[in-house]
Each structure stands twice: as structure tokens, then as C-alpha cells.
Image (cartoon, coloured by chain):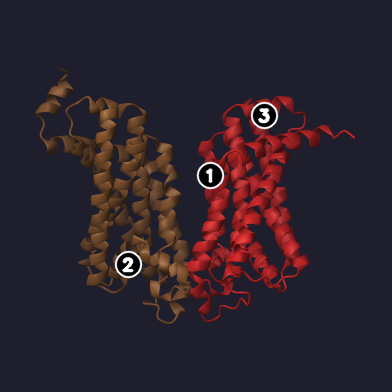
Amino acid sequence: MSRSPYVSTALGIAWRSLHNVFTNPALLLPALIFPLFFLAAFAGGLSAISDTPGFEYPPGYTTFVFGFVLLQASALGGIFTGFSIAADFERGMGRRMLLATRRRSAIIAGYALTAAVRVLVTWTIVTTVALLAGMSVGGDTGEIAALYAISLTVNVIALLFAAGIALRLRTLQAGPLMQFPIFMLLFMTPVYVPQALLAGWVSHVASVNPLTLVLNTNRHLLAGQTAELFATYAVVLGLICLLAAWAVTGMRRAEAAG
Amino acid sequence: MSALTANAERSPLPTQVGSLAGRSVLRTLRQPAMIVPSLVFPLFLLAVNSAGLDAATEIPGFPTDSYLTFILAFPFVQGALFATMNTGQALAEDIENGFFNRLALTPLRGSALIAGQLGGLVVIGLLQATVYLAAGLFAGAELAAGPLGVPALFALSILISIGFGGIGMFMAIRTGSGETVQGTFPLLFVLLFFSSISLPRDLIEETWFRTVATVNPVSYLIEGIRSLFVYGWDAEALGLAFGIACALIVISISISSLALRERMVRT
């Protein structure tokens, strides 16, 4: 049975992009090393924070930090794939892809598939290291499946955001523009302590930051506690719709630029 | 003999250093992309960490009730890490675009080249220290050492910047590649995070992390700066910080000089 041209295009782009990533350690390693680095630095250096009054998270600080690291790893997987899009368009490969493809959204779908496979590898390594480091998980199979499903949507959100910028600017110099806003949003969540213990301006920003809801849900699912699943899915799916439009209009800009 | 060569032959060392330092300063000031990230990024992390980790002051034995005061050493050391990149990147560009080769044809002394390159570093170091201190005090941090602590803070901060700048210079001379210099940044970032940057060493619970932080020299640089904010005049912390900063300068400038000699021969 032959595949539809749309699927063939997406798979072809994903295959090429994944081949580039997995044969070039300089592209593969940063996305792996950064989450591991933060896991070690935060879980190792800051575990005393869990002794502060009001810090209630039964599975322990390593699990608490893992909730953030998983979110960060998922977002980074999308951003780094955005770098690949920018590089492809900067070197002229993107133009050739546009010429060879009838439905251009298949190009974005191909890169989204790339980001998903990349993040799957990162999750496997980061989760294994966290379990070896003594992370305890209170959630059941369904809750853990939901945790990774939500993390996958974060990966798609970051990819679509980065793709929108990469397709508009079509240069690797746009890297900081893809990275910095996501980095800021990630760090303006309750990274180190539960939301109730945040102080100052960060507590106000965190309360309106959509990633705070995702992070809290991650942590609740890991601990086997009641999570605001529906609200979280509503937020992430809403963001996906919004950023899909951002990425598709970016593709139109790239087409118009020739 | 060209005019430049004749002029350089006559010029004493201070003149050579002055010319190159002037170029380095101008070059740094003319490139906002070199200055802005090294100011904005540490301030952003300072703001986020001081609010996000404020609850840490509730840990029994925490030395101050203001986490902002405690963490204010962070931008000073992070800014110095940026100095590594800036100095290394500038020199690597000189090597990549051939300017270094042209300099090598003149009677310029190697020591002048190194000292001159550090000129821009001192300017940006002063600028960074001023901005970080002003931002910290404005946000409510305290300087326990009082007004006399300011020159000590600036001196230590600049020495640390020169020490790390020397590492960037070594990387640039050795490899001649800006990309390689940039590639060392994550390694230096690891040194920063695997230190006593977020908590005092005696409050770090994980034994392996406390051991890493204890053998990591960056911990002592941070603790020296932090002592001025939190404790006032702590002779041991300051002595260790100044000693390590000076040792870092001696080591990094020595290996840079050796690498420079080797590159001059190759040129």
C-alpha cells in the first residue's frame, strides 16, 4: 500500500533531519547534556530546599526537579529542531524542499516528527539517570503515560514556536530568539520550590505563566496526586493551535521570500 | 621598512600596550552584542533565582535572611565567565581574519599583545561590576562590608575577569577558532553550577555534590565576593578568593604566553 504524498514528504524530511542529528554528536549532545546537567545540579545542590517549612512533596526533591527537567528537555528538543530548520533554510536546502513539496505544511510535520524522535531519546536517557539517582515515582502507569503525553505536547509547542522564527528569519543567527523566550518562560515557573513558596515578582509571573500549570501537572502526575489534567490539556492544545498558525504563516513568508 | 614597523620598533612597551588596549576597548564598546548579553543574562538569572529560591533562607543555619544578598555573587562570577568568551572570541576573530598575522610581522612584543587584549576586558569588567552592584543594591541587597567593600569587590571582580579572560585568550591562541572558544562556555557554566553558588557548602546535603563544590575553585571565588555582602570582612574567604584569582591569572597568562610563542613560530 502506497503512502500519501503528504506522509511521504513528512517522513522523508524527518529521516533526513534525524540522520543529520544522529550522525553529528555536536547536534545531538547539547540536547542530552543540558537536562542531565540541570538534573544533577539542582537535585544534587539544592536538595536541602526540601527541608524548608511548607515544602510538601512526598516523593522527594529529585522527583520534584525531574518534573522541571522533563519539561525543559521536551522544550529544548523542539528548539534544537528549530535550529535545524534555520540551518536548512540558510544553506538553501529549505528552498529545494519548498520546490519539491506540494503541501508545504508537510515540511513542518516532518520537522515535528524529528523533534519527537529526538526528545524520545532524551527522555529515555534522562529518565534512566533520574531513576538510577534514586527518583521515586508515585504515579501509576496511566499517570506516567499522561505525563509523557503532556511533555510531547510541550515539545510540539516549542518546535512550532521555533519553526515560526526560523522560517521568518531563515538564519542560524536567529537561534537566541528561539531559545531565550522559552528559557525565560521555563525559569519563570516554580523551578526550585512549590508555587506556594515563591516570593516576589516571580510568584506573580508564575501564576499567569502557562508553563506553570504544565509543570505543576507534571509533578502531581509523578507523585500520583490529583492533577488538573483537563485544564492542562486545554492550555497545551490551545497553544499548539495558536503556534501552528504562527509556523504556517512563517512558512508562507519563506515561500514568498523565494 | 613600513612606517608601522618603524614606529613599533621605536615604541616602548607601555605605548604598544596602550595602542592595543585602546583598540580592544573601542572594539568592545562598539559591539553591543558583546556587552548586552553579559549584562542582561546574569541579571535575569539573579532576578529569577533570588525570588525563586527565597524560601532557602528558612533553612536552619542559612547565613542571611535575604537570598538576594546571598546570591548577588552569582552575576559577578557569571559575568567573568562571559569575559572568557568575549576575550577569546575577539582574539580568535583576529586570528581568523589575518590581523594577528599582520601583527606578528611587526616588532610588537608578545607581552604587549596579551596585556593589550586584556584592556577591553578590564573596561567591560568595571561596567559589569557597576551594573550588578547598582542593580543588587537597588533591589534591596545589603553590602555588609560597607562603602570600603566596594573597591575590594571591584578589585576581586576584575581579577576574576582577567583570570577567566586569560583562559579565553589561551583557547583562542591555541585553536585560532571562535567556534571552539564558544564551545568552552558550557564547561565553564558547569563549574559555576557545581559550586556553592546556590547554598553554603555546609548546607549542601548530597555528599557527592558537596565534595565537588569543595574541590571546585569557583566556589571560593563566589564565597569571597559573597563574604563582602553577607559577613563584612572575612579574611579567610577574601584571602582564598584573591589568592585563587591571582593564581588563575598567573596560570592562564603563562599558558597563553607559551601558546602565543608557539603560534608566532607557526606564523
Give, as a three-letter code, the residue at label 1. Answer: Leu
First in residue order: circle 1 vs circle 3: 1
Task: Pick whichever, B72 or B236, lies toward us.
Answer: B236
Dividing the picture into quadrants, the one containing residue A63 is bottom right
User: Label 3 amino acid?
Assistant: Glu
Q: What's the residue type where badge 2 is placed?
A: Glu
Dot 3 and dot 2 residues touching (CB under 8 Å): no
Measured in 3D between alpha carbons, the distance from the residue under mark 1 to the one under mark 3, in whole angstroms, is: 21 Å
A81 and A255: which one is in front?
A81
Q: CA distance from mark 3 to mark 2?
A: 54 Å
The chain shown in red is which?
A: A
Give the structural element (helix, strand or loop) at label 3. helix
Looking at the picture, tell me which residue is in the foreground, B134 or B222. B222
Q: Pinpoint the chain carrying mark 3.
A: A
Q: For residue B155, which quarter of the picture?
A: bottom left
Q: Is residue B139 visible?
A: no
Residue position marked by numbered label 2 in the rendering: B223
Q: Residue beneath label 3, please?
A: A255
Question: In the drawing, what numbered circle is on residue A177?
Answer: 1
Query: Closer to the observer: label 2 or label 1?
Result: 2
